[in-house]
Image: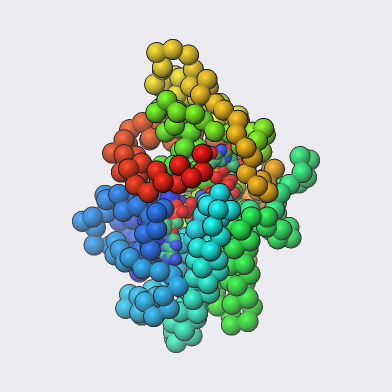
Amino acid sequence: MILVTGGAGFIGGNFVLDWLSDPSREGIVNLDKLTYAGNLDTLSSLADDPRHVFIQGDIADYALVLNLLKKHTIRAVINFAAESHVDRSIHGPSDFIQTNILGTFQLLEAIRAYWSELKSPDKEAFRFLHISTDEVYGSLGPSEAAFSELNAYEPNSPYSASKAASDHLVRAWHHTYGLPVITTNCSNNYGPYHFPEKLIPLCILNALAGKSLPIYGDGQQIRDWLYVKDHCFAIQQVLEAGRLGQTYNVGGWNEKPNLAVVQTICTILDELRPKDNGSYADQIIFIKDRPGHDRRYAIDATKIESELGWRPAETFESGIRKTIQWYLNNSEWVDGVVSGSYRDWLEKQY
Ligand code: NAD
Ligand code: DAU
């Protein structure tokens, strides 16, 4: 079995579904705390699949993690579990320090205790994959080269600082204890099951509900968008063939200003679900900027492409269309999310 943490969240959930869609693959133990961002509806299609073992629990629970590793003779761990939303980290950094730093520390210690007792060849074959972000590299100027694996870490938000700290712990556990780790640093993901606190799902759902589409500042901040299934495939390839102790940047070669992203969503919705009057773009408003808002992220994915042969399958144009169609077709999942604590957050933020 493999152990996935945070597998009820956006990327982890997509990863679990993609992995188990191949019947030849081994099972998954899915450890998730089920914070506001964890959603078992995402995994409902696996209800009768014995290869999916869901455990509600915390990566900071050393005894629980060690017990799961031993009980299921885990051969690899993929760590998606984290607090992931930059705006929430600005309002309240404490959970980010707790899960992203202290949780990763306890997880590493439990894995180290388990791995150090493994015998050859299981010990050599074991892997710990840590899923991280491009935000650890800080903000790029308009003409600076995209982030490579050699860029210095310059995190600017409580979220990115906590992720940077966790990446450093993972690196140190490799260097000091020999733990077989690999870290991936990915750009902005989008796609099915994305929690609507993040820009793309928020704007799709607000547009359909006749609400404002809130753009921070001038909307010219640039993100490098990657369809979530392309990220999941990259992680599979890194697990199979990535080099130990290495980091791999993962990105879609899709740099877009936020305003252009939201305008694209409006244009596609105008076509797929036309309004009686006017365009969804009429709902765009500009609001106060995010404090410390990073201006530009861009990923140089040359290393993973040349070493592992990975390439994203989707362009932004194909991926965003699929994503919008998914939200139009999956109102049951959307209704479940929108009726939850997500509402309280919206009132505080906007
Ligand atoms: P998400 O917020 O949608 O999901 C996080 C999941 O982790 C949730 O299911 C939550 O319940 C769980 N969780 C939180 N704290 C936990 C804990 N202490 N123990 C166990 N489970 C816990 O996040 P996401 O967008 O799916 O991101 C997954 C990972 O990928 C994160 O590490 C994030 O930093 C990284 N990442 C995200 C993006 C992106 O665009 N979303 C891009 C690059 C990297
Ligand atoms: O770059 C990878 C990161 O991408 C991940 O590490 C994070 O976990 C993930 O949340 C995401 O962070 P961002 O802050 O880039 O994503 P978000 O969707 O919150 O915002 C995208 C951009 O849109 C950002 O520049 C802020 C802006 N924005 C966001 C919201 C929610 C708005 O203009 N209006 C909004 O209402």
Figure check: 183 above or below 45:
below
- What residue is drawn where x is 36% and y is 76%? 64
Say which of 203 and 127 sits in front.
Answer: 203
Task: Tell whether 305 sits left or right of 23.
Answer: right
- What residue is drawn where x is 40% and y is 43%? 343
> Extreme right residue here?
143
Whole-percent x and y of residue 50? 24, 62
Whole-percent x and y of residue 184? 57, 59
Whole-percent x and y of residue 192? 41, 42
Quadrant placement of the N terminus: bottom left
Say which of 311 and 62 sits in front.
Answer: 62
Q: Place residue 285 in its image quadrant.
A: top right
Evaluate whether residue 314 shows in this view.
no
Whole-percent x and y of residue 208? 40, 27
- What sort of colour scheme is used for the picture? rainbow
Say which of 244 and 308 sits in front.
Answer: 244
- What residue is drawn where x is 58% and y is 67%? 166
Figure check: 68 above or below 82:
below
Ligand 2 image-quadrant field = top right
Task: Tell whether 52 sits left or right of 146.
Answer: left
Evaluate whether residue 96 shows in this view.
yes
How many numbered marks have been drawn onto this rendered protein structure? 0
Figure check: 72 above or below 234:
below
Say which of 89 and 254 sits in front.
Answer: 89
Figure check: 189 above or below 69:
above
> Extreme front residue here?
348
> Extreme top residue here?
277
- What residue is drawn where x is 53% and y is 72%? 102
Q: Place residue 183 in its image quadrant.
A: bottom right
